[in-house]
Image (cartoon, rainbow, N blue to C red):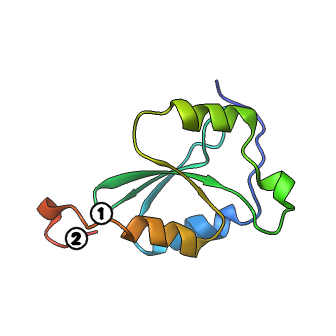
Amino acid sequence: MLRTASRVDANQPAIVERLRAIGASVLHVHQLKNCFDLLVGYRKQTFLFEIKDPAQPPSARKLTAGEAKFRDEWRGSEYHVVHTFDEALAILTARPACPHCQGRP
């Protein structure tokens, strides 16, 4: 289900900009109800990122019931909650690059 108006955390544009600057592909999916915010491709791998704003109080950074349900039922790539670009980068670089990519991102 597509939402017509969805809230984007204040830190999301900066995270997206920096992900793209390191060569990641970023697809915004935050308009899909009860899903996640960003589908990120990096070094031939796919990552699901839910962006939460660390400037918000802890209660505002919790997953919604729909987000939690999606995370719990998803059987594909791991679902990550990130607050900063550095957290996202650590996730992207924790796994080795695809051996068939010959060092390309």
Q: Is residue 81 left or right of residue 98?
A: right
Residue type at mark 2: give it. Answer: Arg
Residue type at mark 1: give it. Answer: Arg
Q: Is residue 8 left or right of residue 90?
A: right
x, y percent for residue 42:
36, 61
Give the residue pinned by disc 1.
43
x, y percent for residue 73:
52, 29
Q: Earlier in the sequence, mark 2 or mark 1?
A: 1
Q: Nearer the viewer, residue 73 or 22?
A: 73
x, y percent for residue 50:
61, 51
Residue 100 visible at all: yes
Task: Give the vertical position of 77 relative to 44 (above or below).
Answer: above
SS label for mark 1: loop
Q: Nearer the viewer, residue 47 or 21?
A: 47
Question: In the rendered structure, are the residues bearing label 2 and label 1 in contact, judged by CB atoms less than 8 Å apart?
Answer: yes
SS label for mark 2: loop
Residue at 72% over, 45% down: 63
> Going by the picture, which residue comes out furthest to the top?
1
Where on the picture, by quarter, is residue 84?
A: bottom right
Give the residue pinned by disc 2.
104
Task: Give the vertical position of 57 relative to 78 (above or below).
Answer: below
x, y percent for residue 35:
61, 36
**How busy is the neighbourhood of tag 1: few (under 14 within 10 Å), some, or many (20 plus)?**
some
